[in-house]
Amino acid sequence: MRTGTTARGIAVTGAVLLAVAACGGGSDDNSSSGSSDSGEKQVNVYGTDGNMGNALGDQFTDAPGALEGMKGTTPLSELKDDFKTKLLEIDPALKDFNHAAESYDAVMTIALAALVCDCDNGKGIGAEIIGVTIDGTKCTSFKECADAIAAGDDIDYDGVSGPVDFDDVGDPSQASFGILQFNAENKLDTLEYRIAGA
């Protein structure tokens, strides 16, 4: 499912860039007035999520700088180097860290909810998911949280993506995203991180 979304994003971006290239050149046909359109037309392209990845830049190896200046946003947290190192140990060919922290925290939240309910069924785990993310003793690792649960404490898990903090209906009350830009090597640089919500 995710691969399909990424592929569509790359295809759409590729089509836009081809259209920009087709429209960008000047005209060789000078009018009788002597004026000509000799400058390149600039079109700003802003990407989101699926097309803001270094995998897109890899599609333009024969066109250095083709994506330079393209900006966009994607779900992204400011990750610590040790977390990135662990991910690269698992997959040294990893190109981007998009959704890594969120995925990790989702698994942690489910595991902690399973500890609280002392069960392995979806309904029981689901009933505890909101509770392990709010209004309790702060903890940031599985061991720290598990020890607190074993001691009978109510926990508030804060993960590698930051505070998880689900609201009353189970939606995240805040989320982080990155503003990215392709450089002259068609690789992404992170310009800044922002948090939306509470």
Image (cartoon, rainbow, N blue to C red):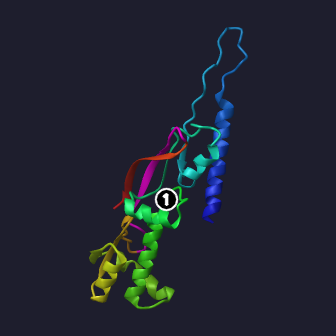
- Quarter placement of the N terminus: bottom right
Drawn side of residue 84 relative to residue 8, left or right: left
Badge 1 element: loop
In the rendered structure, does residue 180 fall within the stretch colored magenta?
yes
Q: In which quarter of the image is residue 82?
A: bottom left
Residue 95 horizontal side relative to residue 12, left or right: left
Residue at horizontal 65 percent and vertical 61 percent from the top = 4
The percent coordinates of residue 139 (x first, y second) are 30, 75
**Does residue 128 appear in the picture of this structure?**
no
Left or right for 99, reference 152: right
Q: Would residue 124 be visible to someone looking at this image?
A: yes
Q: Who's the residue at 64% across and 29% down the image?
A: 24
Camera-side residue of 31 and 179: 179
Q: Mark 1 points at which residue?
A: 98
Q: Where is residue 191 in the image (x, y as percent from the top left)?
A: 41, 45
Q: Count the labels in the image.
A: 1
* Residue 32 belongs to magenta span: no
Residue at figure coordinates x 65%, y 56% from the top left: 7
Query: Mark 1, residues whose alpha carbon is within 10 Å: few (<14), some, or many (≥20)?
Result: some
Image quarter of the C terminus: bottom left
**Amino acid type of the residue tagged 1 in the rendering:** Asn
Q: Residue 28's spot in the image, x, y percent?
A: 71, 18
Q: Looking at the rendering, which quadrant does residue 81 occupy? A: bottom left
Q: Give me the residue at 57% from left, 31% from top.
A: 42
Please identify the quarter of the rendering in which residue 18 is found: top right
Highlighted magenta segment, given as a residue range: 169-185
Instruction: List x then y, in percent, for residue 44.
Output: 54, 37
Q: In this view, does 173 lie above or below 116?
A: above
